[in-house]
Every structure is written in C-alpha cells, then in structure tokens.
Amino acid sequence: MDVKTLCLGVLSRRDCSGYEIRKQFEEGPFAHFQDAGFGSIYPALKKLTESGLVNCRAEEQDSRPDKKVYAITQKGRQALFDAVNQQPAADKLRSDFMFMLFFADLLAPAAIDRMIAQRSAHHAKLLNRLEGCDRVLPAGERFVLNYGIAIHRAALAYFEDHGHELVGALLQKDVAE
Amino acid sequence: MDVKTLCLGVLSRRDCSGYEIRKQFEEGPFAHFQDAGFGSIYPALKKLTESGLVNCRAEEQDSRPDKKVYAITQKGRQALFDAVNQQPAADKLRSDFMFMLFFADLLAPAAIDRMIAQRSAHHAKLLNRLEGCDRVLPAGERFVLNYGIAIHRAALAYFEDHGHELVGALLQKDVAE
DNA sequence: AAGATATATATCGAAGTGATATATTCCATT
DNA sequence: AATGGAATATATCACTTCGATATATATCTT
C-alpha cells in the first residue's frame, strides 16, 4: 500500500489539494492508522496525474499561490478498487516510546514517570478527538473509527493501571543498590 | 530512532550476528513494536563498526559462511544511553488492513468476513506468543511485553464483539439495493 | 528425490522521511 | 504599531529504509 494508493483513497471521498491530503493524515479520518508527508504526497500526485488516475485543476486564490485541486478519475477508482481487494500486508508499528521503556534500566524513575504521564495525556487527547465524531458514517469508516477508540482506551487503561508499577519497581531497585 | 540505535539496543542484551538481530525483530522481544530488515541492518552494523560503537569478530562454522558476531562497545553503550534519554518521537502505525476496511463499501461482505477472521487468528497467535513468555524479566521489558498483551487482547475483543456488525450492515445495504 | 524451511551475508533500485525553502495572510501578544 | 507565530500552499533533496533478489549450504518433510 504505497502513498499513491493512499492518495487515491483520500480523493475518492472528495477533491483535495496536496495540502488538504496531508492534513487528513495529520489529524483527519486517516490519522490513527496511516501517515504520509509532503515529501511523498506531491511526487505521488504527480505520478498519478501522469498515469491518468487523477486530474488536476488550478484554483485561483486571492494573493496566495494557486491551489492545485486533484480529482480522482474513473480509472483511478478502478485502481483503488483493485488495491483494496488485495491481501493486506501486516501492520507496521514503530514505537520509539516502547523501545525506550524496554531499556527502562537506563532511565531515571522520574523521567519514566514524566514520559508515561505525557503518553497518557496524548492518548486521552486522541481519544477525545475520535470520540468527538458523532456524525453518521459509512459502515467501514465507523468500524475503523471505533477500532481506534477501543485501542486508545486500552492503552490509556494500561498506563493508568500499571504505570506506577514500573516506576515503583525501578525505585525499589535503586534503593537496593 | 534509526536502525543503528535499534541494533545497539539488541546488542546491549547479548552479542549477535546480523541474522540474529533480524530474527529478534521478526519474532523476538522487539517484534511487536519495532521492525527492521536485512537491507537496513547490515549497512547499520557496518556504520556502527566504522564509528567504533560495536566490534565484529568472525566465528567459524562447519560448511556455512562465517558468522560475523557483533558486540557493543563502551562507546556504543553510551550512545544507546543518550538515545533512550531523548524525547521519544510519536508512534508510527501503518495499517493497510484498516485502510481497506475504511473502504468496506468496495469489498464483498464475504471477503470482509474472511479478512476479519484471519486478522483475529493473527492477533490470537501473537497473543499466545507474548503470553507464553513467563520468565522473570527486567521491569522495562516486562512492562512493554504486558503492554503488547493488553493491546492485542483489546484488538481481538473488538473484532469478536463488532466484526459481525460490519458484515451485517453491508449485507443489509446489499439487500436494500 | 524433490522441495520447503532455516542459517547466513550482501546488494540495489525504488520508495519514503524529515528538514528546509519560499511566500503570503491572519491572529495574538507585547 | 510592531513583532512573532500559526495557518495556507507548493516544492525539493539528501539521507534512510524497504523489499526483492542473489548466493550457498544443511536439514527437515513429503
């Protein structure tokens, strides 16, 4: 699932500029399970235009660069259909946070305490955002949104229930030394 | 957190060959929150050797290529310490599975049913692997392991509780058409 | 006997990341 | 009134990473 396909997915819902596509990965409906930056979106849109999967029209704006609005074509919809009907690749998760906590022995207990508090706040914020969406959604979108809510709730609960245990264990270890 | 740092982390626990490092990301203690392939591990080990953060010794083997075993140096341990004491970057998740379900309208209900069943089985398998580790672990490793268990349980529960709802909603839609 | 899986290292083109550059408007603070 | 920061908007580029492939042998399974 490359960035070209991700862009097709976004554009299948409504016409967008590159900037607007980026925003949807940053804080929109795709934010909790995909990501793409400008450095991959703009080249992807270029290639999609060249191969006729999207069209581009320039929209004038008052004293701003023209907004290039991209629209998916029928051929693009077919390509999206084909892509979502493949076997999905395994999820890829990269968590520096977990990597650091794995080596908690190298960290000061106070630092861990702070990290976990920050992380809990982060989960709470995202949870709030996801739960705030009470519009009626297509079944697939709703399913994916609710999955995000379930996972963030579980993560938050884990930190609340077990965060202090980790800090406690390390404080005890420090005393023993 | 680049692959060089990930390798330092793995090597801080025990000496490894590139192949063994890869295995630890594939199915070892790092598998549920990080990943790295040969294409990034071998160049990383080369650079780490050049900058003196790891040493390399060749171990002879019967009728197999020499195993190059890497060991972390004191300088390498310092670099790992510095890295884990930074502010962690945000988690990066890329889930093709969720992207596909987001566009469930483009999928046949039977296909979705199959996908969810496969995904549940996958979570159950990973859960089994994580829960199978009943050795006494350092506090940080235990914390990260239990986090993985909590998240996989939540995901599995979500699919069991709500998977049929999605399929049901799409079947109803098909009837209405 | 054949074929798949595991051990082991290595390369390379393609793709993606993260930082930076450019330019303007709007809003808030000093 | 002035300054600075955030938002809107596109684009490039060096570096890193990914995924596939190549090579070679041993072991296990059918």
Image: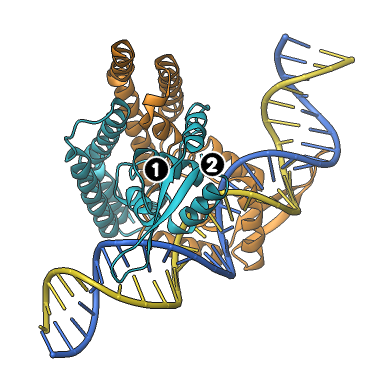
Chain colours: A cyan, B orange, C yellow, D blue
Check if mark 1's residue and mark 2's residue have beta carbons within 8 Å: no
- Mark 1: amino acid: Leu
Whole-percent x and y of residue B58?
75, 52
Tell me which residue sits at (66%, 52%) in the image.
Answer: B42
Point out residue A3 in the picture as x, y percentages from the top left corner: 49, 46
Horizontal side of residue B70 vs A37, given as left or right: right
Q: Amino acid at mark 2?
A: Phe
Label 2 crowd (10 A; few <14 / some 14-19 / many >=20): many
**Which label number is shown at residue A11?**
1
* Residue C11 rendering spot, x and y as whole percentages: 75, 53
Between the residue at mark 1 and the residue at mark 2, the CA separation in whole angstroms equals: 35 Å
- Of all chains, the one bearing label 1 is A
Q: Is residue A45 visible?
A: yes
The foreground one among A74 and B121 is A74
Residues at discs 1 and 2 both on one chain: no
Q: Residue at x 69, y 57 (%)?
A: B56
In the picture, measured across the screen, residue B45 lies left or right of residue A156, that is right
The number of numbered discs placed on residues in the rendered structure image is: 2
Please name whichever residue, A123 or B148, is drawn nearer the observer in this view of the structure. A123
